[in-house]
Image (cartoon, grey):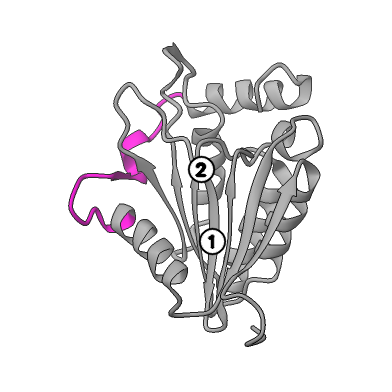
Amino acid sequence: MDENEGEYAVQVLTEGENFTRVQKMLDESSADDIVYAALYFLADPDIVDSIKAAAERGTEVRLILDPNENAFGMDVFGMPNRPVAEDLMDLGLPNLQVRWYNTGDEQFHPKTMAVFSSSGLQVTAGSANFTSRNMRDNNLDTNLYVEADQGSDIYLEIESFFEEMWTNDGADYTLPYEHYLNPHSSWREWVYRFQKISGLSTY
């Protein structure tokens, strides 16, 4: 980063630009990088494919997802994160891991993804869920995208944010993927696919 510029590079992203940035971050990640994401909804098929491709290249991908047990007091049957997570975990890649946030009656509501590399940090966070409705010019969602050098304050703070949840440092923040193994996965997968094709969903 140029010494005459500020410590961080910051960009405001709206609507479809959120999708473009997230996909670029994933597609440019390498085997030396770690991708962390903390998400309420993960459903956009192209983003899911970019996650798969990143992991297949050797990128360490760690996803912390809401289990989608409830949404504002209503039962949502694990949609969409449970079938998406199952699809990802079926790849059998040791560097692609999922943990569930340990929710009660609340939701785990962030929409945050960070790429940590030897050259620094890229992070996006804001209101845009990782779904087609939120990232394909349907909703007026806004995120901030930030680039920072390795070892900078924001690099260390965001790294600590993810590591504490991933390792349960100080509290039982997250649960292992196996905690929500789905005994009706074929039924749930069918409903998920139907909702995606028909558009009868919030994602």
Q: SS at mark 2?
A: helix
Residue type of the residue flagged with mark 2:
Ala
**Residue at the spot x=46%, y=70% of the render?**
155
* Residue with the most extreme bottom position: 3
Task: Give coordinates of residue 172: x percent, y percent.
Answer: 21, 44
Q: Dot 2, how many residues are within 10 Å of its Cα: few (below 14), some (14-19), or many (20+)?
A: many
Q: Nearer the viewer, residue 2 or 148?
A: 2
Which quadrant of the figure contains the N terminus?
A: bottom right
- Stretch of the chain drawn in magenta: 166-184
Asked if residue 168 lies in the magenta stretch, the reply is yes
Q: Nearer the viewer, residue 98 or 65?
A: 65
Looking at marks 1 and 2 on the same chain, the residue that comes earlier in the sequence is marked by: 2
* Residue with the most extreme front position: 4
Nearest to viewer (mark 1 / mark 2)? 1
The residue that mark 2 highlights is 85
Which quadrant of the figure contains the C terminus?
A: top right
* Residue with the most extreme left position: 170
Task: Give coordinates of residue 101: x percent, y percent.
Answer: 36, 40
| Relative horizontal placement of residue 192, taking residue 109 as reference (left or right) | right
Q: SS at mark 1?
A: strand
| Relative horizontal placement of residue 88, taking residue 162 as reference (left or right) | right
Q: Mark 1 and mark 2: span between their CA atoms?
A: 19 Å
**Residue at the spot x=67%, y=37% of the render?**
131
**Residue at the spot x=77%, y=54% of the render?**
20
Q: Nearer the viewer, residue 166 or 195?
A: 166
Q: Nearer the viewer, residue 175 or 151?
A: 151
Query: Can residue 88 be seen by looking at this rendering?
Result: yes
The residue that mark 1 highlights is 114
Residue type of the residue flagged with mark 1:
Ala
96, above or below 99, in the image? below
